[in-house]
């Protein structure tokens, strides 16, 4: 018989995921500042950042409504 799998509380799972995400973002920022990213990767990051800037005003309007 196998032991039951422990259940991770939702808050803990989100906190753990956020830590991993923050570490990844920090590494990307360091590599980007040092010029170690491939040109294609830099282009993708710029597109994502532009899309996020364009979506931010719409999200703010929805939150205010």
Image (cartoon, grey):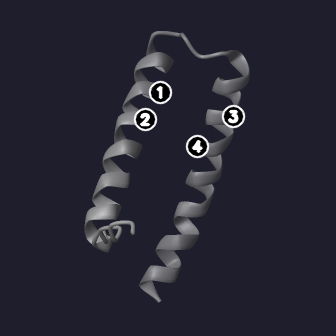
Q: Residues within 10 Å of mark 4 (few under 14, many from 20)?
A: few
Q: Residue 12 or 47: which is nearer the viewer? A: 12
Name above or below for residue 29 compared with residue 10: above
Q: Of all residues shown, which one is farthest toward the bottom?
A: 65
Kindly identify which residue carries mark 2. 24
In the figure, residue 49 lies in which quadrant?
top right
Kindly identify which residue carries mark 1. 28
Kindly identify which residue carries mark 4. 49
Closer to the eye: label 3 or 1: 1
Disc on the earlier residue, 1 or 4 = 1
Disc on the earlier residue, 3 or 1 = 1
- Dots 3, 4 in contact, CB < 8 A: no
Instruction: Decide if residue 28 is on the left or right side of residue 6.
Output: right
Q: CA distance from mark 2 to mark 3?
A: 16 Å
Residue drawn 45% across the image and 10% down it: 34
- Dots 2, 1 in contact, CB < 8 A: yes
């Amino acid at each position: 018989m196998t032991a039951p799998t422990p259940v991770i509380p939702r808050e803990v799972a989100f906190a753990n995921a956020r830590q991993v995400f923050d570490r990844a973002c920090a590494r990307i920022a360091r590599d980007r500042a040092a010029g170690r990213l491939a040109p294609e990767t830099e282009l993708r990051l710029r597109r994502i950042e532009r899309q996020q800037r364009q979506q931010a005003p719409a999200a703010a309007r929805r939150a205010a409504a």
